[in-house]
Amino acid sequence: MGTALIYDEEMTKYKLLWVDPVCKIEVPERLTVSHQALIKSGLADRCVSVPVREATDEDILLVHSEEYLEAVKKTPYMTLEDLQVFTLKYGDVYFHPNIYHCAKLAAGAALQLVDSVMTGKVRNGMALVRPPGHHSMRSAANGFCVFNNVAIAARYAKQKYDLKRVLIVDWDIHHGQGVQYCFEDDPSVLYFSWHRYEHQKFWPNLRESDYDAVGKDKGVGFNVNVPWNKVGMTNSDFLSIFCHILLPVAYEFCPDLVLVCAGFDSAIGDPEGEMSASPDVFAHLTHLLMNLAGGKLCAVLEGGYNLTSLPQSVCQTVQTLLGDPAPPSANLTGPCRSALETLHCVRSAHLPYWSCLSHAAELPTSDVSTKRAKLTEGKAPQAGEEEKKSAAVAEWPEPPRRVPPPVRTAAVLPDGVACPDRCQRFSSSEDPGPATVRKLRETFFRDANDGGALHTLVTLTALVEKMLKNEVGSGLALVSNVPAALACAARHVAAALNKRVLVVCVGDRMEVIPGTEDGKTVLVQFSSHESDEQKGKYEVPVCLKKGCSDVPGFMQAVLSLLLPLGYEFDPSLVLLVRTAGCEVCDSAWQQLTGLLQGLAQGHTLVLMHEEEKSHVATTVSRLLGDAAPPLGPLRAPLADHMEAVERIRHRLQTEWKLLQTTTTGCGECGES
């Protein structure tokens, strides 16, 4: 299975034919620079090219009215004057004699992508299309959009493939009101949108774009709006929203398909968004979504008007869809105060509908930055001129080059244990030298007969070194002495200059790992054993008293505790340890393994006891990038487990800013 790329030059063959300051940014070059960047980087050649087809009337009528479709059909035959008059019927859009044809191609491209993914021809893909779609409504063009490409694709997928649940993630900087209106009463479609809002002062200036517009009738709770009330949002703000809202809700929902309204006007330098998120953050957002729906993800281009950050962001997204390691997640300083206010409001609004948010804080009685409070005062602020000027002239470095290692996954396995397909059996060919052997023996073994175990440690050290040099991506080791192997690997990383290691243990509690004293190692332990002592910033015992078999509770801890901490720590290597007493089910273990690969540029080393060999194949499969099976719609986590996770989050949130979900006690969380 591969990654589909859908593009047709025909969709560049329309443009604005008159002067319109609002519409002048929607240019054919948006598509051409994106496609050329994919070609120049070599990413296009690695994708499966899928031809475009026109959407049929039947396809379009899944979302739009017949009257509107018939009106648009007449535009190819209109004079310039007629097109201008027709355009005035709608908002912030323009028409061209070829736009009807291109709009049919754009919608058809989204449908081709859905067909390719749902029939298993590819695993995922991206459609580079024009015109965009998420603003168009049942009977109206709007915001450069003619037909609602993603909404049509969602209805089509549900109808043709009998899908029960579809997740639409809209990370464009504008609210996709057309998608919201289409599905706001439909509990089978979960629509998530973050968007620049500024207390209803930013286009499309809708009351129903605010956080408390949660859906209607049977669809209540299935519409999640995240309004940005200031410009300049960063990678920290975007990732915080994913970890504390979108991912917990999405896992509870358990979609059969993920559709992304992939608008890159959320990236730095965009004249519409005026945000400060770097293009590489879209690699991380894409990676996190790829763990849902068995990896079935379709990204469809929406906005993006900076002709530098747009192609960079497209390349970051496609490279992740192809399975390449994510870039480093450096310089995450935590969400700003405005983002925390929005996060708090959204979680509070959805508290009644999602069990994963059952411990969200209620809205305070004091005036937080809600639209209603500000509009009542009549003082709704807009971005200051200085902020706008700063965003307009923003400069940022080229995203880091993402180099896939020569060996994707290697395994250290005892004799007699078969190495899974596509995985390379690893053995050290280098002589460690007598000094290294002596040090290993003195540190870990007193029994002179432990030659086999000693050889395993030598091999493990060599594997870690290969991973740190990016000669090997990820690894797995079956060992007879898990504590010794863990301590050996952690010491080796901690001894390296400026290297940090995140240790994640699942099962019985391990002894203290070296490096936690100086901050080079963070240890997160999932077990059923409660710790008697208060741990520090770098040791995080997560006690799930009834064991990790509580999948909802375990996943809640992973998504809202482990991932934010891991992203902020930015390790050089992740050590994932499956100890004796690990009760986590295989599908949850695979989810954990996949999610952690968004950290440390995919350098994850899994350590398991020799008796755990039955888990080798599925674990290696995840390390190789294969999709994890869905967990199924999650029930409510056990109350004790939710309370335990919240206690830990509260304890650590002053030290780890990405754990914050309210402004209470956030201290220096960012600009106000």
Image (cartoon, rainbow, N blue to C red):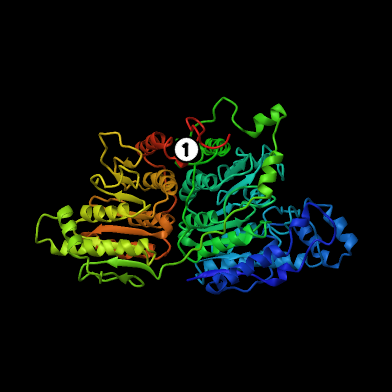
Residue 572: % across, % down: 39, 55
Q: Is residue 177 visible?
A: no
Query: Quick check: 491 left or right of 290?
Result: left
Badge 1: residue crowd in 10 Å (few <14, some 14–19, many ≥20) = many
Above/below status of 256 relative to 517: below
Q: Which residue is mark 1?
A: 660
Residue 417 quadrant: bottom left
Query: Quick check: 60 left or right of 613?
Result: right
Q: From the image, which quarter does the C terminus lie in?
A: top right
Q: Is residue 605 visible?
A: yes
Foreground pick, 421 / 469 = 469
Above/below status of 653 relative to 308: above
Query: Quick check: 59 left or right of 427?
Result: right
Kindly state the secondary structure of the residue where label 1 is placed: loop
**x 60%, y 57%: residue:** 262
Query: Quick check: 429 left or right of 35?
Result: left
Foreground pick, 37 / 101 = 37
Above/below status of 606 relative to 406: above
Residue at the left extreme of this rendering: 448
